[in-house]
Image (cartoon, rainbow, N blue to C red):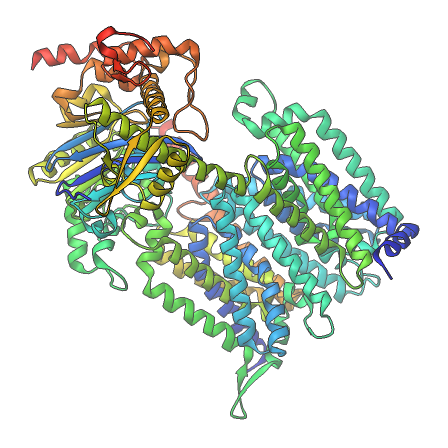
């Protein structure tokens, strides 16, 4: 596999799994939870590091997923105690992140973990970090990790699609029907945590947050059907990673950063020209209507 | 403890919110096959009452039974029409899809809605006169049409008891008529409907029975018996300066 | 080396004194501005603005080639304002909700910043090291110049919030009303946003992006627990912010290898948690205590009410406790504790007969039961006739309040009118209805 292709596939897989989950996050008005989780998993990663003593993906994945869930649990508890939602999110994730940074600096010697790498990721190194099975090179580790996360979220959301849908649309009705709203909530948050961590090493926290929000917001402007929205979101995510990689080559800039910029450009296009909700589109329609009423 | 075969049996129910009691001493047995209005001033706890009955709020005291058993066991028998503002109508989904959600409770885990469910949902939409709007995105519907979609969704639940939270608020005349027609249809099918309502002018016309509420239960009984100046006075606590004259002339014409 | 000498050493080092004054100033100014942001429900804006500062800082560096904090401040302020305008535009002109728009702007601006950052690295601007300090913050690197800039900005911010106190108060509480009074609400919002940007930007170097978000919101959220007044909340939030800054710096200086920024955040979070649990009115502990007291009081009232109502209807025998549960469903445990406490007060007597428990009132108990029923029924008629009678007898933490003396007579008359007056008065041991005597 060529280097560029590996990077693009990794980026696309991250984009696809984030875009998928991101739709539910923004429909449930929890977009900032993605940001919160992606920061709050840091202590989980460090603790997993210290306990397992290796950079193995599995313990890290578990540690981070646990912290991600813990973060959402704290936020939920603070909210239910009457703390306003924005404060609950900020207080929780900043505290967990601070603990993570302290742990890193306490155990700098044991933890071979570069903070910069956590935040920006080094997708450029993905092709060199390959996985071996029975002595055979079976391809880059990142692709396996992110691919697994993608398949997992795809399966879970597929199985519980109608539950995810009704909980996002009308949680009260869902509760009245006997659907365990809180369980579905934590299921979604668990998936977001796992995806975040799996994507972390390769693309960094920022690309994860961007991919959780930007493609799904773009899709939200382009369609009125949940199924289509999910598909568009995944599509826009993949396109962003392609276009972003191209941008990074041209400007010789950070790949993850460029992919984020690319996603942002797609969003601006949808914001202006979406056939349903675009600002320019609506303006044109209004002008046409006014012209029609002026000259009957 | 005594069990009852009444559709809804509420005993000594009280709900406190942030330590302030918002509802207390609610105690009634709803008769089967009646349209029951729940009236009272703003902040009287009308919505709180139906949410508490449906287990959506924790009770501070008391007990609720649906056909003699706790709500949790009888969920399938209960249909719900929440207030229209309680959801985000920008959600990317169609009218038919929303109605289909009413079938989710019957479907259970993992199973997807089948063609039969889709037909059932379509029938329900038809009953509220919205069949032509099935594919329409819900944000493109008017307020009244959205209310009818919610009504159709509760019909899709195929329940024996219905709770409706202010279905008549902010709807057009056509929707109001459709809701009345559905209510009467439900009544002929021996279903029990509890409706939070606040338009006193129409109470006599719409409801057989009445629950009058102002943080506590003021009266419960057949409309002709309990909808009196005295009870209105008690319920609205002198806030009604014009209306108390209303019931008497109406009563005389009957 | 013991801690005292360490601290002594700490204070004798001019460099660390700079750091200390810097972090305290930072805590104070972000505490004040954060209070307004918190009340305006814009707590997450701190996080967004901190991230949005990155492209501004990079641009300032690319344009000027210098690491002067003043240029960074200007660059970050410009992108910060751009970010807040982008958020407003997106929520106003599309159906995208605020939280999505926050996360979107945050990540895209930061992405742009990273692109700029790599540009700087690749094009060899030379002394680019130190730019990334803005992301994680390094208080230890604070020097005199930085602190002067921080101090100047912080004092300006404090002055401004003092001057515009009344306007900001209105903006946070009821912007619509403010507009009707003729205040330029949009402009005020912009000024508040600008001040928030400044507060965030001056903190970036010391605390870093993520932790700056905490300094904005955590002290304000903690302060909210202790007071119901905005002016006190501002002072308290400033104090708690400064305290977190000082604690974090001191702890960091006395313990090797620990970065200051995260320690400040941990200190602030501790203060928040303490406020959450222990604050007297809103704290979890006092809430739990009050709730338990309310429940117990309610159960006691139910028992007394039950005793009295049976007696009122001419039933004189001791009552089976099962009948209380039948009339007033409650958990057996709660009933038991209510019965025990009533027995302890000497208001009731409990006897056991063949597996069942029977209760009867004592002399004092009957008087109390009468008072309870009278109070409950008066509360009921008061609710029915609230607008005619006026006054207020609802009280927090109790299901029925005390009846004010001036309301007693009108309420008694209303009770008689509805036929709800307690018919048997244990004090005169006669049926009240016969003589019509008001007790």
Position of residue B175 relative to residue A101, above or below, is: above
Residue C359, percent from left and from top: 28, 35
Position of residue B105 relative to residue B131, above or below, is: below
Residue A62, percent from left and from top: 52, 70
Residue A94, percent from left and from top: 62, 53
Of B249 and C423, the residue lying toward us:
C423
* Quadrant that contains the C terminus of chain B: top left
Q: Of all residues shown, which one is farthest toward the bottom?
A: A135
Position of residue A48 relative to residue A24, above or below, is: below
Of C90 and C400, the residue lying toward us:
C400
Question: From the viewer's perspective, is B69 left or right of C400?
Answer: left
The residue lying at 82 percent from left, 56 percent from top is C253
Position of residue A210 relative to residue B139, above or below, is: below
The residue lying at 35 percent from left, 27 percent from top is C365
Question: From the viewer's perspective, is C379 left or right of C204?
Answer: left
* Quadrant that contains the N terminus of chain B: top left
Report which quarter residue C337 is drawn in. Answer: top left
- Whether residue B218 is visible to the viewer of this picture, yes or no, is no
The residue lying at 75 percent from left, 33 percent from top is C158
Question: From the viewer's perspective, is C49 left or right of C126?
Answer: left
Question: From the viewer's perspective, is C268 left or right of A277?
Answer: right
Of A168 and C265, the residue lying toward us:
C265
Residue A38, percent from left and from top: 57, 60
Report which quarter residue B62 is drawn in. Answer: top left
Please count the marks in the image.
0
Of C255 and C86, the residue lying toward us:
C255
- Whether residue B98 is visible to the viewer of this picture, yes or no, is yes
């Amino acid at each position: 596999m060529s280097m560029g292709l590996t990077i693009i596939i990794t980026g696309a897989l991250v984009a696809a799994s984030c875009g998928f989950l991101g739709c539910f996050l923004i429909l449930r008005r929890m977009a900032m939870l993605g940001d919160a989780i992606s920061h709050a998993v840091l202590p989980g990663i460090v603790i997993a590091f210290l306990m397992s003593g290796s950079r193995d993906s599995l313990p890290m994945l578990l540690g981070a997923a646990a912290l991600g869930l813990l973060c959402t649990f704290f936020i939920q508890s603070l909210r239910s105690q009457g703390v306003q939602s924005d404060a609950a999110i900020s207080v929780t994730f900043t505290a967990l992140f601070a603990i993570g940074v302290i742990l890193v600096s306490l155990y700098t010697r044991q933890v071979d973990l570069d903070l910069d790498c956590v935040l920006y990721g080094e997708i450029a190194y993905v092709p060199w970090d390959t996985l071996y099975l029975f002595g055979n090179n079976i391809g880059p580790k990142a692709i396996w990790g992110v691919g697994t996360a993608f398949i997992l979220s795809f399966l879970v959301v597929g199985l519980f699609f109608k539950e995810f849908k009704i909980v996002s649309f009308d949680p009260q009705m869902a509760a009245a029907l006997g659907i365990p709203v809180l369980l579905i909530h934590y299921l979604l948050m668990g998936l977001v945590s796992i995806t975040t961590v799996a994507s972390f090493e390769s693309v960094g926290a920022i690309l994860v947050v961007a991919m959780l929000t930007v493609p799904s917001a773009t899709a939200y402007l382009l369609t009125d059907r949940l199924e289509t929205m999910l598909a568009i979101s995944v599509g826009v995510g993949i396109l962003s990673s392609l276009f972003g990689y191209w941008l990074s080559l041209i400007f010789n800039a950070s790949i993850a950063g460029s992919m984020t910029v690319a996603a942002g450009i797609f969003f601006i296009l949808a914001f202006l020209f979406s056939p349903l909700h675009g600002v320019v589109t609506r303006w044109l329609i209004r002008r046409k209507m006014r012209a029609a009423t002026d000259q009957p | 403890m005594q069990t009852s075969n009444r559709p809804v049996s509420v005993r000594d129910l009280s709900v406190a919110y942030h330590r302030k009691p918002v509802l207390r001493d609610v105690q009634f047995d709803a008769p089967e096959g009646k349209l029951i209005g729940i009236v009272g001033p703003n902040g009287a706890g009308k919505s709180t009452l139906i949410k508490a009955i449906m287990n959506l709020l924790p009770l501070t005291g008391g007990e609720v039974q649906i056909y003699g058993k706790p709500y949790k066991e009888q969920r399938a028998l209960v249909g719900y029409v929440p207030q229209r503002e309680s959801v985000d109508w920008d959600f990317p989904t169609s009218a038919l899809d929303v109605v289909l959600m009413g079938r989710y409770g019957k479907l259970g885990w993992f199973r997807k809605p089948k063609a039969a469910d889709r037909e059932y949902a379509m029938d329900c939409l038809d009953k509220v006169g919205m069949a032509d709007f099935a594919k329409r995105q819900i944000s493109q519907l008017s307020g009244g049409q959205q209310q009818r979609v919610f009504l159709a969704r509760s019909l899709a639940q195929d329940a024996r008891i219905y709770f409706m939270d202010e279905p008549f608020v902010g709807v057009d005349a056509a929707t109001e008529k459709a809701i009345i027609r559905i209510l009467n249809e439900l009544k002929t099918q021996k279903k029990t409907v509890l409706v939070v309502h606040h338009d006193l002018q129409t109470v006599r016309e719409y409801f057989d029975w009445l629950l009058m509420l102002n943080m506590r239960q003021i009266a419960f009984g057949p409309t002709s018996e309990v909808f009196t100046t005295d009870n209105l006075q008690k319920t609205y606590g002198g806030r009604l300066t014009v209306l108390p004259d209303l019931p008497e002339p109406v009563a005389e014409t009957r | 080396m013991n801690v005292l000498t360490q601290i002594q050493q700490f204070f004798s080092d001019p460099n660390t004194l700079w750091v200390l004054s810097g972090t305290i100033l930072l805590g104070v100014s972000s505490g004040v501005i954060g209070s307004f942001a918190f009340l305006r429900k814009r707590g997450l804006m701190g996080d967004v603005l901190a991230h949005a500062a990155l492209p501004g800082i990079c641009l300032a560096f690319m344009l000027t080639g210098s690491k002067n904090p003043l240029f960074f401040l200007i660059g970050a302020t410009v992108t910060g304002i751009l970010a807040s305008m982008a958020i407003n535009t997106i929520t106003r002109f599309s159906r995208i909700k605020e939280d999505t728009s926050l996360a979107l702007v945050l990540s895209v601006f930061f992405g742009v910043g990273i692109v700029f950052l790599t540009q700087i690295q690749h094009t060899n601007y030379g002394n680019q090291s130190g730019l990334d300090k803005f992301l994680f913050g390094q208080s230890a690197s604070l020097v005199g110049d930085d602190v002067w800039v921080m101090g100047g900005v912080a004092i300006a911010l404090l002055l401004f919030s003092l001057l515009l106190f009344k306007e900001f108060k209105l903006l946070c509480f009821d912007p619509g009303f403010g507009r009707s009074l003729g205040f330029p609400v949009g402009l005020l919002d912009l000024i508040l946003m600008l001040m928030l940007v400044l507060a965030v930007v001056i903190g970036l170097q010391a605390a870093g992006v993520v932790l700056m978000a905490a300094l904005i919101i955590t002290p304000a959220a903690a302060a909210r627990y202790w007071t119901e007044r905005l002016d006190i909340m501002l002072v308290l939030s400033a104090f708690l912010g400064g305290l977190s800054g000082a604690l974090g710096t001191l702890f960091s200086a006395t313990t090797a290898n620990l970065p200051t920024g995260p320690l400040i955040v941990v200190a602030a979070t501790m203060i928040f948690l303490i406020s959450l649990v222990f604050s007297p009115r809103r704290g979890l502990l006092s809430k739990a205590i009050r709730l338990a007291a309310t429940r117990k009081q309610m159960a006691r009232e139910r028992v007394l009410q039950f005793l009295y109502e049976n007696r009122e209807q001419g039933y004189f025998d001791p009552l089976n406790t099962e009948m209380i549960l039948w009339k007033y469903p409650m958990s057996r445990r709660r009933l038991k504790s209510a019965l025990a406490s009533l027995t302890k007060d000497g208001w009731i007597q409990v006897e056991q007969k063949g597996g069942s428990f029977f209760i009867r009132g004592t002399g004092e108990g009957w008087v109390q039961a009468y008072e309870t029923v009278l109070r409950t029924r008066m509360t009921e008629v008061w609710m029915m006739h609230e607008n005619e009678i006026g006054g207020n007898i609802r009280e927090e933490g109790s299901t029925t309040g005390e009846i004010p003396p001036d309301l007693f007579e009108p309420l008694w008359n209303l009770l008689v009118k509805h036929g709800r007056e307690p018919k048997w008065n244990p004090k005169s041991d006669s049926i009240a209805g016969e003589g019509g005597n008001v007790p």
